[in-house]
């Protein structure tokens, strides 16, 4: 592929101004919404081929979320595009000041395989709404979905506005060598570091949506049955291959055994007595990840689950107890259906355990005690999370989603998506009917007194 030609084609398209008017942006969003509706069955089928996702789960966690993002941007686009008037200091009288939103230009969106539709198209919606041209690079580990999205976007957009690049590492490397105006990457920390290093060569700003070990703290006053139901939903959605899945549980020792019983009951209720044969239970994406997860099963004691089907690349929902903090399963993001459960004796002990580790992308807390909720929020740093639920904080266009520290930088969803792909220019428009002489040479004592009165 001629990467330079593709890049120059997009640059020319952008500089021609075809993406910048309200009408052009609205038409682009309308086309994508219509195309998403027309290609929905193909996308759901591709998700089932790549990840074994049931159509219900594919719509709930992928297509439905993209549709919400599209509707939100269509509804708020005109308001977001308006210049925003701000106050002007008295020293600059007479003038008015405003912030002028402008597209960043050419944007690279690099998406992962675990939610290939949502994590490709949701940022793309924000980039298009903000008036940019976009190169989308979906993951090669979900090839059927990548091809289905390429077909969808070719129908909706001129390649000068939105281009899709299929392929693997070679294509990723070639794209990262190009001087994009912004890079949006979702994936793991290791590749995120590489993206940041490559972007630094061109001084390209980046948004990194990474991951980490997201803890779930269960206090002694939690509603254990409800907590178990919501933990099972968040942990085993997409067979645990979710960047904000509860990675491990910290449970008050006094309720650990009752919680384990409730978790076991909820797993059976969700996936039946033999989850490996449950048609709605997804599979592990490829052999490499499957073998890595099998290796992690060797730590601790298996309380429930632990069986696998290599041919189908399925691993049962598995609970691990007697896990040590220095075990490999506690040193890496699991990204699969394994759930270590560790006890704690005091809330302060749980807080120290989390605080001593890198800032997680998400944190979950189950308790009715407001003082405990406040203490956790004050003392721990994390990207976002839930109180008395899991993962649903990212399923809204009304709050930004993103990490902090090693779990990411920047955010998106709703207004945050538009802001991520927009540069706000600060403009001061000075009047010409009056030109106060205070700031000009020669400086005098009288001018200084006047200056000090207005600048303080």
Image (cartoon, rainbow, N blue to C red):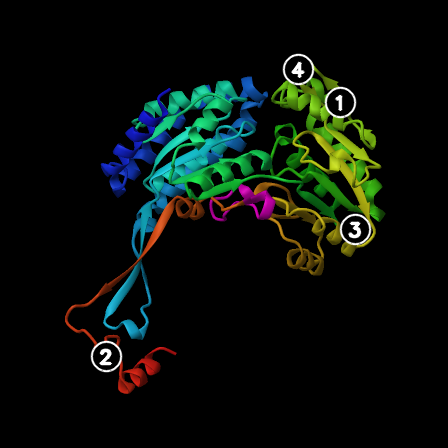
Mark carried by residue 220: 3
Q: How far apart are marks 2 and 1 (CA)?
A: 88 Å
Label 4 packing within 10 angstroms: few (<14), some (14-19), many (20+): some
Residue at image position (65%, 24%) is 289
Side (left or right) of 349 relative to 65: right
Q: Mark 1 points at which residue?
A: 273
Q: Mark 2 points at which residue?
A: 442
Q: Distance between the residues labelled 4 and 1?
A: 17 Å
Side (left or right) of 73 relative to 307: left
Q: Name the residue under label 4.
A: 312
* Secondary structure found at label 1: loop
* Secondary structure found at label 2: loop
Residue at image position (51%, 39%) is 197
Q: Give the range drawn in magenta.
A: 393-408
The overriding secondary structure of the stretch rendered in magenta is: loop
The tag earlier along the polypeptide, 3 or 1, is 3
Q: Distance between the residues labelled 3 and 2?
A: 73 Å
């Amino acid at each position: 592929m001629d990467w330079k030609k593709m890049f120059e084609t997009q640059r020319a398209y952008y500089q021609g101004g075809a993406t910048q008017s309200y009408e052009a942006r609205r038409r682009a969003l309308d086309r994508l919404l219509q195309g998403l509706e027309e290609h929905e069955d193909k996308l759901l089928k591709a998700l089932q081929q790549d990840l074994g996702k049931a159509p219900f789960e594919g719509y709930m966690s992928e297509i439905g979320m993209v549709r919400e993002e599209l509707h939100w941007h269509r509804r708020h686009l005109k308001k977001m595009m308006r210049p925003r008037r701000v106050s002007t200091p008295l020293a600059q009288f007479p003038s008015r000041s405003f912030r002028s939103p402008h597209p960043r230009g050419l944007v690279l969106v690099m998406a992962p395989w675990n939610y290939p539709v949502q994590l490709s198209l949701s940022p793309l919606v924000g980039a298009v709404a903000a008036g940019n041209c976009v190169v989308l690079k979906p993951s090669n580990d979900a090839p059927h979905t990548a091809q289905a999205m390429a077909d969808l976007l070719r129908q909706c957009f001129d390649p000068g506005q939105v281009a899709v690049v299929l392929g693997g590492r070679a294509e990723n490397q070639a794209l990262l060598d190009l001087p994009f105006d912004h890079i949006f990457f979702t994936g793991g920390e290791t590749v995120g570091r590489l993206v940041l290093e490559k972007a630094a060569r061109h001084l390209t700003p980046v948004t990194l949506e990474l991951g980490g070990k997201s803890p779930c703290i269960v206090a002694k006053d939690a509603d254990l049955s409800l907590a178990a139901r919501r933990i099972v939903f968040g942990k085993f959605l997409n067979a645990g291959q979710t960047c904000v899945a509860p990675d491990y549980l910290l449970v008050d020792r006094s309720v650990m055994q009752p919680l384990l019983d409730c978790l076991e009951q909820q797993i059976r209720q969700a996936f039946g007595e033999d989850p490996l044969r449950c048609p709605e239970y997804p599979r592990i994406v490829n052999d490499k990840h499957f073998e890595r997860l099998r290796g992690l099963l060797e730590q601790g004691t298996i309380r429930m689950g632990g069986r696998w089907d290599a041919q189908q690349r399925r691993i049962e929902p598995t609970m691990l107890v007697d896990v040590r903090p220095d075990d490999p399963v506690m040193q890496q993001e699991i990204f699969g259906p394994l759930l270590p459960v560790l006890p704690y004796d005091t809330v302060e002990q749980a807080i120290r355990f989390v605080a001593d580790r890198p800032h997680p992308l998400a944190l979950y807390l189950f308790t009715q005690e407001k003082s405990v909720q406040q203490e956790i929020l004050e003392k721990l740093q994390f990207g976002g999370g839930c109180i008395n639920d899991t993962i649903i904080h990212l399923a809204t266009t009304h709050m930004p989603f993103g990490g902090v520290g090693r779990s990411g930088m920047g955010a998106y969803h709703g207004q945050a998506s538009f802001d991520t792909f927009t540069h706000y220019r600060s403009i001061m428009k000075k009047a010409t009917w009056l030109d106060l002489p205070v700031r000009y040479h020669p400086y005098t004592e009288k001018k200084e007194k006047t200056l000090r009165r207005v600048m303080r």
